[in-house]
Amino acid sequence: MCETVMMHLFSSYCKPILLYALDSVHLSNSNLKSLTHSWHAIFWKLFGTNDVDCINGIHRFMGYLPFVTEIDARRVGFFYTGLCLVIIL
């Protein structure tokens, strides 16, 4: 199967499991490292590289945000939604 298709499948099915409810909790640096390592392991297996710079380049090329940035973006969305609910009530 093509790497692009595999990455789309991983992004559609595995990434939501890794990111589930992370926008509502505080994560320590070790937790963030562990989650990032898990996401990078997919790239290591699929593309056969363990160079972090290469993996970050693949992220950019394929249009994926870095894992920590995606968690931060979801966290901002979570707080914004909560703020909108408070204003409405």
Image (spheres, helix red, strand yellow):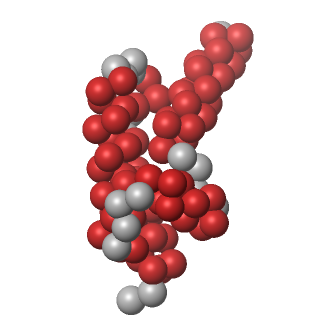
- Residue shown at the point (39%, 18%) measured from the top left: 26
Asked if 41 appears above or below 70 in the picture, the reply is below
* Residue 54 as seen in the image, left or right of residue 81: left
Residue 74 visible here = no
- Name the residue located 68 percent from the left edge and 19 percent from the top edge: 84
Q: Look at 65% across and 15% down and name the residue there.
A: 83
**Picture residue at 63% right of the left edge, 11% below the top:** 86
Q: Nearer the viewer, residue 86 or 57?
A: 57
| Percent of width and height locating residue 58 | 54, 64
Q: Quadrant of residue 82?
A: top right
How many labels, in total?
0
Q: Is residue 56 visible?
A: yes
Q: Find the residue positioned furthest to the bottom.
A: 1
Q: Position of residue 38 (x, y in %)?
A: 30, 50
When the figure is inspected, residue 16 is found, relative to residue 24, above or below; the finding is below
**Relative height, residue 34 to residue 5 (above, below):** above
Q: Quadrant of the C terminus?
A: top right
* Screen quadrant of the N terminus: bottom left
